[in-house]
Amino acid sequence: MKKQAPFVIANWKLNGGIDLTCTSVASMLNRKFEARIGIAPPYVYIGDMVSFLRNSDIMVGSQNVSKFASGAFTGETSAQMLSEVGCQFCLIGHSERRQVFLENDNSCHTKMEKALDNNLIPVLCVGENLQQYELGLTNDILYRQLHQSLPDLNLEGKELCIAYEPVWAIGTGKAATADQVQKVHSFIYQELVEILGTERANKVHILYGGSVNKDNVEELLSTPHVDGVLVGGASLDPEHFAEICALANKSAQ
Ligand code: PGA
């Protein structure tokens, strides 16, 4: 069966600035992509990036979203605001948000609702840390994260991404192997069937993230149940990211 066009999402984290915004846009604009490319810069560059990319198919998204709609919540940005400025997707529950900012599955669930209500494609990040991996707890952790964040969402006519990001693979240069990824993504798919039913589960895009680069992206994207990639470090080099996108194009053809 021919795979759908894969997602390739760049997560800049707390990196980059107006220079990287301009060079990234410049390296993407004159190329044609089959893959569905998205860039999540820090909040303050979203507006510029949306206007620079307005004549392209490249999506702009955010790295986080508030669980609140409005009010006295200093430092927060709502899903409605993100949608208004032109974001098309938002990351939710990235492991750095969970570890450093103590986000949990409950807040992820609320953020999922807010994103869906405001027509943002939620990219829910899940994954085990090194200790959990070594203790063989990967499936238990994923089970909890998925079963607490996904039930009772109104997914009618909406798209949804799950990004499997083993914490031990993030920023370490040690990506999970295609074999490991295939096993975990099959488990995620099974759980999606249980939570959402087969028809909806078949429409969810399951992405892999953790040390993705131009040397491993093709193999990862040719792995069953891998519908895209979430790229951190390698997306900060515009040429490297454009190469990853071009390789993803090939897997879409
Ligand atoms: P990495 O980060 O590609 O630098 O490992 C991925 C992520 O944290 O989303």
Image (cartoon, grey):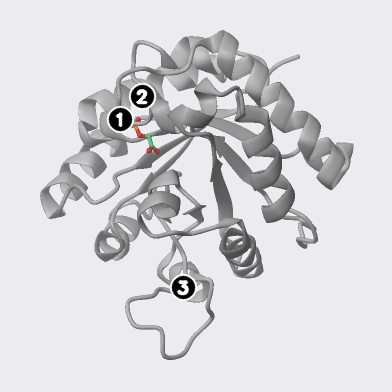
CB under 8 Å between discs 2 and 1: yes
Specify whether 250 is left or right of 182.
Answer: left
Q: Residue 84 carries which label?
A: 3
Going by the numbered disc 2, the residue's amino acid type is Ser
Helix, strand or loop for disc 2: loop
Q: In this view, does 11 lie above or below 129?
A: below
CB of mark 2 near ligand 1 (< 8 Å): yes
Residue at 34% from the left image edge and 30% from the top image edge: 31
Extreme residue in the bottom direction:
72
Helix, strand or loop for disc 1: loop
Specify whether 206 is left or right of 251.
Answer: right
Disc 1 target residue:
171
Going by the numbered disc 1, the residue's amino acid type is Gly
- Quarter of the image for the N terminus: give it: top right
Measured as percent of width and height from the top left, residue 152 is found at 80, 61
CB of mark 1 near ligand 1 (< 8 Å): yes
In the image, 162 versus 117, the foreground residue is 162
Q: Residues within 10 Å of mark 1 (few under 14, many from 20)?
A: some
Residue 64 found in image quarter: bottom left
Measured as percent of width and height from the top left, residue 184 is found at 64, 23
- Quarter of the image for the C terminus: give it: top right
What whole-number distance in Å separates the C-alpha atoms at marks 3 and 1?
32 Å
CB under 8 Å between discs 3 and 1: no
Residue at 51% from the left image edge and 70% from the top image edge: 79
* Residue 139 is at least partly visible in this image: yes
Q: How crowded is mark 3: few (under 14 residues within 10 Å), some or many (20 or more)?
A: few
Disc 2 target residue:
211
In the image, 213 versus 97, the foreground residue is 97
Going by the numbered disc 3, the residue's amino acid type is Glu
Measured as percent of width and height from the top left, residue 146 is found at 69, 45
Residue at 24% from the left image edge and 51% from the top image edge: 14
* Residue 253 is at least partly visible in this image: no
